[in-house]
Image (cartoon, grey):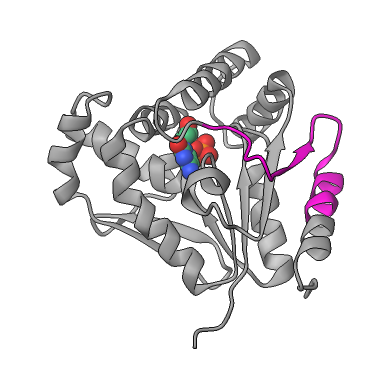
Amino acid sequence: MSQKTYAVAVDGPSGAGKSSLSKRAAAAFGFVYLDTGAIYRTVGLAAKRSGIDRKSDEALKNILPQVQLEICYDETGLQHMILNGEDVSETIRLPEISLCASDVSALPACRAFLLDMQREVAHKNNVIIDGRDIGTVVLPDADLKIYLTADSRERARRRLLELEAKGVETDFDTVLREIEERDWQDTHREIAPLRQAEDAVVVDTTELNLEQSFEAICMLMEEKLPVCRKS
Ligand code: DC
């Protein structure tokens, strides 16, 4: 019989801190971290490179047979995305890929293509998975569901700092507009829209710093799962 694995689903809007907090919590508990946004970003990049209409399900369906996606982890536990043999982990973080990802993520062909891939990682490992529909669609039986959120202006402020640190030139209003546009697209799409699962615990990080947010997540994991921190 296979051993019981535990899954923590972390959903919420862009820039709420899902990936940095989930990555850190996964390392602290010895869980695998799966950033599903990175997978959608990779499909968004593939769609952009092929020049298709990114809002057309039919067009995406036609290119998917040529899209080979692999998820691998380096020795530090960092997730890498490989698209047709090329490591695209950095390219998919460019701001212009964010909207491409949001566009393709609304298409049924894209979501169907990625569903099993995400479930497979969860069934084989103890995982923390972050995304938009993990607690509602991908893993409705997750052992712990967290809805991580923050006010949009605070999320824009944090995203701006991140982009500035990477040397990307932009400004607060542009980042806020992009965040609000993505929030709207992600919550209004027909399939698997971003919403809080009924049994999710809400963690609002607007007034919390990184350390306080991390503690909130670790405490929830310790409270709800039979696991303890390794570091
Ligand atoms: O988390 P992120 O910003 O890297 O995600 C990029 C886009 O992918 C986001 O706009 C919505 C989409 N996404 C999704 O629809 N479902 C997921 N599980 C993860 C991301």
Where, quadrant-wise, is the C terminus in this rendering? bottom right
Picture coordinates of residue 60 (x, y %)? 20, 35
Compared with 128, 186 (above or below) is above
Say which quarter of the image contains residue 180.
top right
Picture coordinates of residue 227 (x, y %)? 76, 73
Compared with 19, 128 (above or below) is below
> In front: 94, or 24?
24
Picture coordinates of residue 107 (x, y %)? 31, 32
Residue 11 visible in the current orientation: yes
- At x 40% / y 26%, what residue is drawn? 190
Compared with 32, 69 (above or below) is above
- At x 80% / y 29%, what residue is drawn? 206
Residue 123 left/right relative to 221: left
- At x 18% / y 28%, what residue is drawn? 52
Residue 72 visible in the current orientation: no
- At x 75% / y 39%, what residue is drawn? 202
> In front: 159, or 105?
105
How many discs mark residues in the rendered view? 0
Magenta stretch encompasses residue 182: no
Give the magenta-colored segment's residue range. Answer: 194-217
> In front: 185, or 201?
201
Magenta stretch encompasses residue 208: yes
Extreme residue toward the bottom, this view: 1
